[in-house]
Image (cartoon, grey):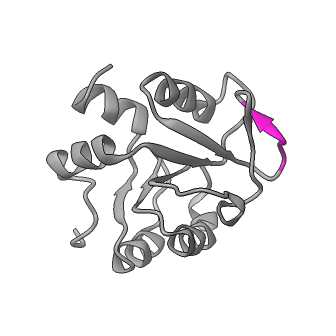
Amino acid sequence: MHINDISADRAATRALLQDTRTIAIVGLSPNPQRPSNEVARYLRAAGYTIIPVNPACDQVLGEKCYASLREIPGPVDLVDVFRRPEDVMPIVDDAIAIGARGLWLQLGVIAPEAARRAADAGLKVVMDRCTKVEHAVLIGR
């Protein structure tokens, strides 16, 4: 485990979720049947500000949707990624550029090189875990 890869550290993961207010969800689908949409609805209900990032949409869940992280006008605490592993490195570059504090790669999104790059830049990294599940287990509603 890299120093900033907190995937296996339950206390660090809990702290990241507790310290987070704004979550940019990259790959957020407007389809309510998709996992990204379900997770976003859960996180919003849990009190987080959700910022959709999907170049194919103008709005998702009634929120303005941005084509990329770099287009978001305000601060982002956590970048939650619902994309294929091979698409993650440019997202990491954008997360670093906007000053995000954390990178969360969802279940099945396993991109060790991208995670290492994010961790080396000082971001807290969680890989191959679901924000909804971890929030429910570690914090609850």
Image coordinates for residue 90, horizontal then vertical, percent: 63, 72
Q: Nearer the viewer, residue 52 or 92?
A: 52
Give the percent coordinates (x, y) of residue 5. 28, 64
Q: Residue at x 25, y 58 (%)?
A: 6
Bounds of the magenta segment:
56-60
As for residue 111 lying within the magenta part, the answer is: no
> Residue at left 26%, top 68%?
4
In the displayed structure, would residue 140 be above or below residue 5?
A: above
Quadrant where the C terminus is found in the figure? top left
Residue 68 falls in image quadrant: bottom right
Q: Identify the image quadrant of the N terminus.
A: bottom left
Note whether 55 is above or below 122 in the view shown.
Answer: above
Q: Nearer the viewer, residue 129 or 20?
A: 20
Decide if residue 93 is on the left or right side of residue 107.
right
- Picture quadrant of residue 32: top right
| Spot occupied by residue 126 in the image (x, y as percentages of width and height) | 35, 55
Q: Compared with residue 94, is residue 48 higher up or lower down, i.e. above or below? A: above
In the picture provided, is 62 more to the left or to the right than 51? right
Q: Name the residue located 44 percent from the left edge and 54 percent from the top edge.
A: 77
Up the image or down, 6 lies above or below 51; here it is: below
Q: Residue at x 51, y 28 (%)?
A: 44
Between 30 and 22, the one lying in front of the other is 22
Q: Is residue 50 left or right of residue 106?
A: right
Judge left or right: residue 28 versus residue 7: right
Determine the main secondary structure of the stretch shown in magenta: loop
